[in-house]
């Protein structure tokens, strides 16, 4: 189990690093993490869940990821689609910083 967690953690870090290098600089800093997640019923297919630091940046990341579809598929053909979520607690901190 520990080996599996270490492998999963490494995959998350690899995707996160790659995505931050690939995205425009203004978006890269708003990627909190990237989680490759196995898709149920899809033999070997994965979904990339990209965690953003706010809902506003998450919306911009959705558009950017759409444009990177070919690059993502080239990096890993098992990726079936991407999903963007706001990292837990991140949006509230961003709002608090504005006050």
Image (cartoon, grey):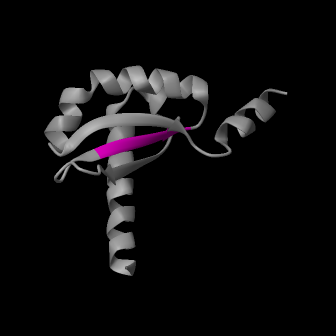
Magenta region, main secondary structure: strand
Q: Nearer the viewer, residue 65 or 99?
A: 65
Residue 30: within the magenta?
Answer: no
Q: Looking at the picture, how far across and down is residue 76, in whole percent?
A: 18, 45
Residue numbers of the magenta segment:
47-52
Query: 11 or 21, which lies in front?
Result: 11
Q: Residue furthest right?
A: 99
Residue 55 versus residue 96: which sits nearer the camera? 55
Residue that sits furthest to the bottom in the current view: 2
Residue 93 lies, in percent from the top left, at 73, 39
Residue 40 percent across, percent down from the top left: 29, 51
Q: Is residue 29 visible?
A: no
Which residue lies at the image location 37% right of the left edge and 79% below the top edge?
A: 1
Residue 57 is left or right of residue 44, and the answer is: right
Above/below status of 85 relative to 15: above
Q: Quadrant of the C terminus?
A: top right
- Residue 64, given in percent of the width and then of the height, sits at 37, 23
Q: What residue is rendered at 44% in x and 27% in y?
A: 61
Q: Can residue 71 be seen by looking at this rendering?
A: yes
């Amino acid at each position: 189990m520990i080996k599996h967690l270490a492998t999963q953690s490494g995959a998350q870090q690899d995707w996160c690093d790659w995505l931050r290098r690939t995205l425009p600089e203004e978006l890269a800093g708003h990627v909190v993490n990237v989680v490759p997640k196995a898709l149920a019923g899809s033999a070997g297919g994965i979904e990339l869940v990209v965690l953003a630091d706010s809902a506003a940046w998450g919306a911009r990341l959705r558009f950017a990821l759409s444009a990177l579809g070919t690059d993502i598929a080239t990096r890993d053909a098992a990726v079936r689609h991407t999903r963007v979520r706001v990292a837990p607690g991140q949006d509230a901190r961003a709002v608090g910083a504005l006050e």
